Image (cartoon, rainbow, N blue to C red):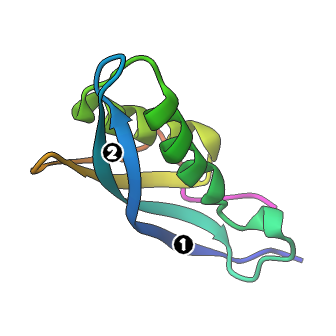
């Protein structure tokens, strides 16, 4: 039996977090993430679904606890790399980080992505 795959879109909107800016200063931030992937049309188990919880945990943990003090642009690029590295079914990610009156928006597609999955 062949498993039918369809495009999935996972959206996380207005995720409130903090972005570390130097060793002691933190900035409030809001993150919007849209993940585009190809996954089973009728998932049999939770593992068949695109899991967005680790993405949220990454934003809530790595950004506010990280000692690097990454600039917003680098933080968004790191987030996208984390998402693309985590699940091979993800083919495209849009992310926006708003902090201090500035919004950084980055869109990235996987460099090589095969639209066909073999079950």
CA–CA distance in space, label 1 to label 2:
16 Å
Would residue 118 appear left or right of 80 to someone viewing this image?
A: right
On the question of residue 59 being in view, the answer is yes
**SS for tag 2?**
strand
How crowded pointer 2 is (Cα within 10 Å; few <14, some 14-19, many 20+) is rated as: some
Pick out the residue farthest to the left. 101
- Residue at horizontal 81 percent and vertical 69 percent from the top: 46
Q: Which residue is mark 2?
A: 108
- Residue at horizontal 28 percent and vertical 26 percent from the top: 21
Would residue 47 appear left or right of 55 to someone viewing this image?
A: right
* Residue 11 horizontal/vertical position (percent): 45, 69
* Residue 56 horizontal/vertical position (percent): 54, 53
How crowded pointer 1 is (Cα within 10 Å; few <14, some 14-19, many 20+) is rated as: some
**SS for tag 1?**
strand
When the figure is inspected, residue 91 is found, relative to residue 27, above or below; the finding is below
* Residue 36 horizontal/vertical position (percent): 46, 63
Would residue 103 appear left or right of 80 to someone viewing this image?
A: left
On the question of residue 83 being in view, the answer is no
Q: Which residues are magenta?
A: 114-119
Which mark, by number, is residue 8? Answer: 1
Is 37 within the magenta?
A: no
Q: Nearer the viewer, residue 49 or 115?
A: 49
Pick out the residue farthest to the bottom. 42
- Which secondary structure dominates the residues rendered in magenta? loop
Which mark, by number, is residue 25? Answer: none
**Count of numbered marks:** 2
């Amino acid at each position: 039996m062949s498993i039918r795959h369809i495009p999935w879109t996972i959206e996380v909107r207005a995720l409130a977090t903090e972005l570390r800016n130097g060793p002691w200063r933190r900035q409030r931030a809001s993150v919007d993430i849209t993940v585009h992937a190809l996954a089973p049309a009728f998932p049999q188990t939770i593992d068949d679904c695109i899991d967005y919880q680790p993405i949220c945990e990454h934003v809530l943990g790595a950004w506010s606890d990280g000692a690097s003090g990454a600039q917003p642009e680098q933080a968004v690029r790191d987030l996208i790399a984390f998402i693309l590295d985590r699940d091979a079914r993800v083919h495209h990610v849009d992310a926006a980080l708003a902090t201090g009156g500035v919004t950084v928006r980055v869109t990235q597609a996987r460099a090589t992505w095969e639209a066909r999955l073999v079950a």
